[in-house]
Amino acid sequence: MFEHKILQDLNAYFLKLNQRDGKGVYFYRINGYSEEIKSFIQKFYESARQTGVVIEGKIPNPDEKNLSYYYEMMGEDFQLRMGFITSSLIKWLPRMNEYQRNCVSASIYDTLDRMRKSGKNDHMLKNAYVKFMCWLYYKFERIVGQLGQEQVPKILYEGNISNYELKLITILSNAGCDVVLLQYHGDNGYLSFDKESKLSIAYPMTGLGSFPETFSIRWIRSQMEEQMKIQRIYGSLPQLTNCTNAWIEGKGFLDILKEVLLRGDDPKLFYNCFIRINGVEDKLTYINELYQFYLQLKNTKRKIVIINHEITIPTMEEIEKIRRNNYSDFDQMVSDLSANIQYAANHELQKLTKRAFIDILVEEKKEKEINLNRITNKAIYILCWLKRYLPQLFPDWKAPDIGSFIFLGGCRNENESMFLKVLSKLPIDVLILNPDLNKKCCLEDAFIYEINYNNSLEVGRFPCENTEIHIGTAAYHAERELDTLMYQDSGMYRDQQCRNATAIILKTMYEEISILWDQEVKYRPNFSVVDGMVNVPVIFAKVSGVKDRLLSNYWSDVKKLITDDTYLVKKAPFISSTDVNPIKPYVTEFLKYEKVQRNKIKSHKAYPYAVLREEMQDYLLDKLQLLLEQKSIKGTFENGTEYTIISVVLNLTKDIVRLIQKFDFTRKNPKLIYINTTEAVISLEDTILMAYLSLVGFDIICFVPTGYQTVENHFAKKVMEEHQIGEYIYDLIPPNFDTISANRRQSWHQKLFMRRN
């Protein structure tokens, strides 16, 4: 029989028989977990699957059919003799050779003899013998035919082993098998059968923890199957591998400027860096430092791409060039989309890019709960950007060339973050510059090298030309630091500090409207600023009826709400479908696949908002897209209403545009008061105007003394709050509010002329 050897290293399990000291076998129990143990079990599982047996749970006891077949073949006889056992094995397991048969029979005899010496009677010995023979035939026949060969057969047992299972596996181990017992709940159960650990050894590795709850052979198998699927997706792998940051000295710009040939000499590697520099060392010299770095980098003749603050989202034309289908699972999606990566001029670069693309998608899948549609959209963005920028970085690439990708401002979203991770796995130095510490780069990666400085500086553009260099004085930077101290997380805000906002409609009592109306929005309930986004509480209400039929009080209350920031509409409809609108002929050009075509709008000759601040133009187009997506206007993307929405939004009156231009998201917001005293129907265009201005951040009130349905006719859902304040009155004429006092009641002759004759 084979001797049980002491392990010096877990990898000894995988040595061939003639490479082992004394040609022994190993029988160990593993009672704790580590990453090393996990890797070993994965490897041992694969070996046992190919040249042995994997037992998950108990070995099934022989059933009546098994026993009936055994007795039919072998008869009822049993003798505790080597000769009897050997001759029985010739008939029962005929494919074993003589050496294997002698090993197994000797091991069976030894086990049964020890049972006899411990007090077991002949009947018990026979039952054990028959059980062992049935198990050998039905469960372990593939193993006994490999005993004594150079490739030692393996048994992997998972769980709490029983007494007779341990005896059988000991038989096979003594006959020439390697065995591993995986015991997730410790050794207590095992030691009840083998108190002195004579049959096997507990693996003595220090620092082992408890097995994770999800760990099992089934989990290992699923992981291996997943890995095999991924390997099939990768296809032919590149010969080169990235050596990222391992060679750098932590000097930032100097590391990137280091000659490629001096970075390392392994022909199987390309040496690139992935660096993020947060803050600046010296505000006075930083811009010039960037410019000098750019000139030196340019002199190296490397290909350079510089991005300022955002990677422009793919255009519809770019997206349409990506070949794609409908996908039912992740593997299908990755395999199909990665076929878009084609570089006929350099197959090695194609393989590198494909591997990097798949690596990042697989990583994304592991880290987050997968939404197939969402990750597909991310993959399409990455492919669009690869097609856009790689021709600039690699027009004629050959190893060991390294390109340079500089991103000023830091990643704002997951799409940009994933794209830069892909680039970091290619022959590209990726440098992220985040000089403004008030803005955080969202990219997180274990391989990125970070350099941090305490000073913060706003930088509009990376200086590629000396005309772009703008250097602040010491006093200028001191003022900016004072700004940071005063206006960051203090509840105070400087003029036009925030550039984006979300309108939140307040539900109020009617009496609260006059209180909130002329307040700065920062004092209203639910106002907040989160990551530069202002949550602006706004009023969007309809007031029906006249309180106590007192017209003087009614018009006086309206007058109180007419502020310097209020646009007043006294007659319905304000905008008619027949009005001249220079935008109307072009609206079909401005929408594609339900997305506003920003670039086309901004570059069009009829675009009226080019005079506004750039961030305000983007803000207005954002709200236009939001109004379309919400589909709050009836008929949006059903009967062409979307084009009416675009024509109204892009043709606001000059006075309304000026109110928007001066709108500071943390101060007083602009207002719209719409008075409808007759049966005139409010137009679709008027409804669109009010819905849009509400999203922009306007307070809006519709005064309807008649109580008739007005703006709500064109809404697909309830948007505005309605306040019923009194009786309905008809045929009123809105007064000249210049003659109305907000503090006094109207005279009898004012009341008289407020009604129609």
Image (cartoon, rainbow, N blue to C red):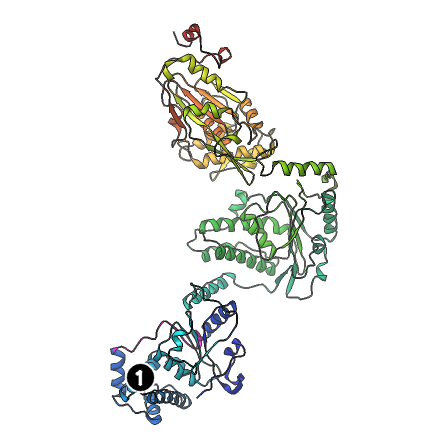
Mark 1 — residue?
128
Res 51 seen here: yes
Q: Quadrant of residue 691?
A: top left
Q: How many marks?
A: 1
Q: Nearer the viewer, residue 509 or 300?
A: 509
Quadrant housing the N terminus: bottom left
Residue 35 placement, left or right of 181:
right
Queried whether the magenta region covers residue 54, the answer comes back as yes
Q: Nearer the viewer, residue 541 or 51?
A: 541
**Residue at 35%, 79% in the rendered image:** 163
Q: Is residue 190 above or below residue 394?
A: below
Amino acid type at image mark 1: Ala
Quadrant housing the C terminus: top left
**Residue at 65%, 56% in the rendered image:** 273
Residue 4 placement, left or right of 113:
right
Q: Quadrant of residue 78?
A: bottom left
Residue 108 position in % (x across, y down): 36, 87
Residue 332 position in % (x across, y down): 45, 57
Res 394 seen here: no
Residue 727 position in % (x across, y down): 34, 17
**Residue at 44%, 84% in the rendered image:** 176
Queried whether the magenta region covers residue 492, the answer comes back as no
Provide the residue span drawn in magenta: 48-63
Residue 167 placement, left or right of 340:
left
